[in-house]
Image (spheres, grey):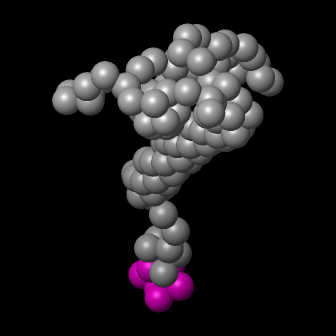
């Protein structure tokens, strides 16, 4: 057997080698696809969270002044996001009866619900005078 005939018989890939290489490429592409899909879900989740947060901040900014914010519930909709503001007396121990001119805490809870998903609630405390003088 000549040298050129021996080289021709050893050159190239066998069918098994080609199939193994293709399966490795397929596994790698599947892994990359799963990573991209996971990243896209994470981005959508963060985007939705930030949208709800900015909506809640806009609502809190538009709330009436502290002496005009009466206990109760206010609700509405902004850009497809339903929101609700609950104003309640802050439950604190040992406050005693209100004294004229004293500041009393109120609990303010702003809840924003996305059109297609979860709700987010932000709680804060506002002070209100016992009288308007």
Q: Which residues are magenta?
A: 1-6
Q: Residue 51: x percent and y percent? A: 67, 37
Q: Residue 42: x percent and y percent? A: 52, 42
The quadrant of the image that shows the N terminus is: bottom left
The quadrant of the image that shows the C terminus is: top right
Residue in the foreground of this view, choosing between 132 and 71: 132
Residue depicted at 67% across the width and 25% down the height: 68
Residue in the foreground of this view, choosing between 56 and 39: 56
Marks counted in the figure total 0
Picture quadrant where residue 60 is located: top right
Furthest-right residue in view?
A: 79
The answer to whether one can see residue 114 in this image is no
Q: Is residue 92 magenta?
A: no
Residue in the foreground of this view, choosing between 38 and 30: 38
Q: Main secondary structure of the magenta part?
A: helix
Vertical arrangement, residue 50 with respect to residue 15, above or below: above
Q: Is residue 2 magenta?
A: yes
Question: Is 97 positioned to the left or the right of 32 in the image?
Answer: left
Residue depicted at 52% across the width and 33% down the height: 129
Question: Is 122 positioned to the left or the right of 112 in the image?
Answer: left
Residue depicted at 49% across the width and 48% down the height: 35
């Amino acid at each position: 057997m000549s040298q050129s005939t021996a080289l021709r018989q050893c050159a190239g890939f066998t069918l098994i080698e080609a199939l193994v290489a293709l399966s490795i490429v397929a596994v790698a592409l599947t892994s990359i696809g799963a990573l991209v899909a996971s990243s896209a879900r994470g981005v959508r989740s963060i985007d939705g969270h930030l949208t709800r947060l900015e909506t809640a901040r806009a609502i809190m900014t538009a709330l009436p002044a502290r002496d005009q914010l009466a206990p109760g519930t206010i609700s509405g909709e902004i850009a497809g996001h339903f929101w609700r503001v609950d104003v309640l007396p802050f439950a604190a121990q040992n406050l005693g009866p209100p004294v004229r001119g004293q500041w009393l805490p109120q609990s303010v809870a702003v809840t924003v619900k996305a059109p297609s998903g979860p709700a987010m609630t932000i709680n804060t405390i506002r002070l209100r005078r016992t009288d308007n003088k």
